[in-house]
Structures are given as C-alpha cells and as structure tokens.
C-alpha cells in the first residue's frame, strides 16, 4: 500500500483578487496562505511522510515549507504544474474572458477535452504530463506515505486519471486552498481508494474569505 496526501497550495494574492494564475504565473503565498501552510503542518507534522512532491511553482513549495524545514526530502516536478491558461493568465476576467472561459468549460464537459486554452493547455495535455510523474512516485514502493502539493485544475485532472474517469467529469472534484485529499494505492489491485476529499478541518480558526480564483 501507498498512502498519498494530496493537497492544493495555500492562498495567493492572485487567488484573493480573482486573477488567473495557471502555470505561467509563479506567485507567492500571501499572509493567509502562509497561515494555512502552518496550520496544515501543525495538523499533520506527525504523519511519517517519506517524501514530498510538488510542482515547479513557488506556491506549492511554500505550502509545504514547514515540512521541508523539518528535514523531509522533496522533489519538484513541472509535470505537476497548474493547467496553462495561456492568454488569460495574469488577468482579472471581464465579460469577454468570462464568455471564453465558459465556452472552454462547456467544450470539456461535452467531451472535447483536447480543446486548448489560447496559448495554453488542454486537459489531455495536462494529463499526459502528469502520468509520468505519478508513475515515478508509484515506482518507489519503499515510500509508504507521501505528500503531494499541486494546483486546483491540475488536481481535478489528476483525480479523474487516478480513478479511471473521463476528463469530461473532472469538475465534480471540488477543491479549496490548502484542502486535503487522502488516497490509498493498492499495488496488488493497482487501484486507488479515496479516504478523504477536499478536507479543510485543519484550517479551523483561520479567518475564512471567499475564494474567487481556482488556479
């Protein structure tokens, strides 16, 4: 068995302000995001993680920095980066971008998952770069418990892959900043079991603010 703690990064100012990040904006956590990272560490510091895996973007590394500071080994993989939103990145969507975004989501939901964001990714492209990283993580059978920190849309795509679902179904997977999914992988059956989904109980006590960006 391998237990995978899968988390989304903490809040950034881009999240708070509703600005699209994607893979092309390498933003830092804001004050609240750092508080979320500390709260997650306090809740899970006694879990015997063998290794941490993050994307190549700063906000994921900063979200697990307390574990790194405690001496846990970690690796960065660009294959875990957020969905690339192309021309939308760095913008606060107005009417035109909102219509464009809705058309993308509609296409994906009806199965056109090879449709790309202008200058960016398609869900199929993201899945294809995630699979080698997941295979790499699974190949290390001696690592019994790992922590993986990623991004919102990328997590949606990853979970459909792990649970053998069509990409058109990815939006049924919810997420919020510094949420936790806990999965168990059985090497004999080669199947995943979901033990916890979009859990944020570790953030109790941190003032809640509505989140307006999912990148």
Image (tube, rainbow, N blue to C red):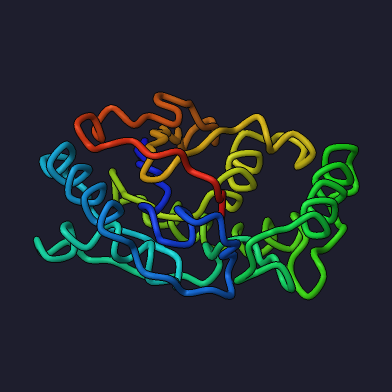
Above or below: residue 61 compared with residue 199? below
Q: In this view, does 75 lie to the left or right of 120?
A: left
Tell how many labels. Answer: 0
At which x and y percent is residue 163? Answer: 62, 34
At which x and y percent is residue 202? Answer: 24, 33
Residue at image x 16%, y 44%? 48
Residue 3 placement: quadrant: top left
- Closer to the camera, 28 or 2? 28
Q: Is residue 203 left or right of residue 165?
A: left
Q: Is residue 43 left or right of residue 213?
A: left
Q: The C terminus is located in which quarter?
A: bottom right
Above or below: residue 8 compared with residue 137? above
Residue at image x 74%, y 66%? 121
Residue at image x 73%, y 58%? 94
Above or below: residue 77 compared with residue 126? below
Residue 127 placement: quadrant: bottom right
Residue at image x 18%, y 64%? 68
At which x and y percent is residue 79? Answer: 56, 67
At which x and y percent is residue 43? Answer: 16, 36
- Closer to the camera, 83 or 29? 29
- Closer to the camera, 110 or 15? 15
Q: Is residue 205 left or right of residue 8?
A: left
Residue 72 placement: quadrant: bottom left
Q: The N terminus is located in which quarter?
A: top left
């Amino acid at each position: 068995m391998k237990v995978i703690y899968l988390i989304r990064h903490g809040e950034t100012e881009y999240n708070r302000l509703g600005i699209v990040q994607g893979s092309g904006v390498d933003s830092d956590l804001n004050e609240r995001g750092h508080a979320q990272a500390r709260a997650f560490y306090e809740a899970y510091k006694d879990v015997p993680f063998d290794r941490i895996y993050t994307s190549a973007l700063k906000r994921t590394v900063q979200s697990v920095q307390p574990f790194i500071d405690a001496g846990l080994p970690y690796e960065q993989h660009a294959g875990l980066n957020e969905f690339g939103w192309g021309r939308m990145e760095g913008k606060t969507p107005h009417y035109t971008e909102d219509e464009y975004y809705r058309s993308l989501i509609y296409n994906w939901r009806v199965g056109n998952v090879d449709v790309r964001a202008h200058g960016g990714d398609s869900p199929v492209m993201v899945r294809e770069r995630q699979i080698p990283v997941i295979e790499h993580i699974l190949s290390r059978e001696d690592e019994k418990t790992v922590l993986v920190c990623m991004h919102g849309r990328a997590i949606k795509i990853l979970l459909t892959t792990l649970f053998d679902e069509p990409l058109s179904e990815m939006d049924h997977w919810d997420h919020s900043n510094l949420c936790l999914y806990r999965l168990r992988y059985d090497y004999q059956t080669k199947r995943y079991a979901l033990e916890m989904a979009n859990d944020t109980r570790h953030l109790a006590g941190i003032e809640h603010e509505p989140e307006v960006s999912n990148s």
